[in-house]
Image (tube, grey):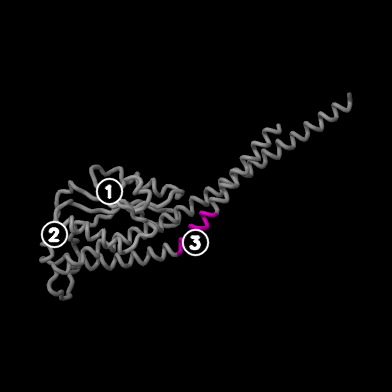
Amino acid sequence: MGADTKKLRTRIKSVQSTLHTTKAMGLVASSKIKKATESMHKGREYAKALSLMVEQLSQSAECAKSPYMQKREAERVKLIVIAGDRGLAGGYNANIFRFVRQFSDVIYIPIGKRAHDRFGGTFYSAEHFSYKEAIELSKTLCNEFAEGAYDALGIVSTKYVSMMAQEPTLTWVLPLEKKEGTASCSAVFEPDELTVLNAAIPEYVAGILTHCVKESFASEVAARRMAMDSAGKNAQMMIDDLSLAYNRARQGAITQEITEIIAGSGE
């Protein structure tokens, strides 16, 4: 009986240690949520403005000559995959990697330590991804696309729906598509629309990429907060059950000792 109480006491301490860790990580995630969501909303607005500008420019007949609007057989595809720098975020990272399984024979460009560990390549932090890194990567990818090194560029990221829900999504960036029903731009561009579009594309791709990274990070923080809350509740329930079992075992040991003492005194 003494061995049982010792095992239960050790188990309780172990679960309590886990509970302290989950609470600490939950508090860290909570402290980051506000800043991450504010950054995400700003990124959405910036990406929306860039997309509108590019859509209006792409309506020009002259811009149809741009190498960024030339559709090719998508045999050589590059995918930027955005995952987290850390684990313990519920299904956040697993959902991204499960999503990319549907693609085969593609070149992966990872952002986030978890994506880097899986796909290799240059390391970019998801939490600390800077616009400088975005524009440098964008210029390289745009130059390669214009030169015909690959046929299509997409970004696999996580869409923030709510604190409770985040969804993997794919955003195709290159080649540009001329959207029907978009109003043509009445502005006059110098020297011409084609030159302006070609010059704007690296900024456009960098803006979309930055937005996707910010939204993915907000999704990661929200997923980690919910995962830690759930883990904390489960740990507390386990502690309560183990404490009840420990008290019963201890009471049983005490009762047995009293019984033995009474039996011994009767002899």
The CA span between labels 1 and 2 is: 22 Å
166 left or right, relative to 181: right
Q: Secondary structure at mark 3?
A: helix
Residue under the image location 27 percent in, 63 percent down: 135
Toward which corner of the image does residue 188 lie, by quadrant? Answer: bottom left
Label 1 vs 3, first from the N-terminus: 3
The residue depicted at 24 percent of the width and 67 percent of the height is 52
Q: CA distance from mark 2 to mark 3?
A: 44 Å
Q: Where in the figure is residue 137, as x and y percent of width and height?
A: 26, 58
**Callout 1 amino acid:** Tyr
Q: Provide residue 25's location: percent of width, then percent of height.
A: 51, 54
Q: Residue at x 71, y 40 (%)?
A: 247
Magenta range is 24-34
Residue 86 x %, y %: 43, 51
Q: Which residue is mark 2?
A: 67
Can you say which quadrant of the picture contains the C terminus? top right
Q: CA distance from mark 1 to mark 3?
A: 32 Å
Residue 243 seen anywhere in this rendered image of the structure: yes
How packed mark 1 is, by other alpha carbons closer than 10 Å (few <14, some 14-19, many 20 or more), is: many
Residue 104 appears left or right of 146? right
Q: Which mark is residue 108?
A: 1
As helix, strand or loop, the secondary structure at mark 2 comes to: helix
Residue that carries the numbered disc 3 in the rendered image: 31
Asked if the stretch drawn in magenta spans residue 199, the answer is no
The answer to whether the residue labelled 1 contacts the one labelled 3, judged by CB atoms less than 8 Å apart, is no
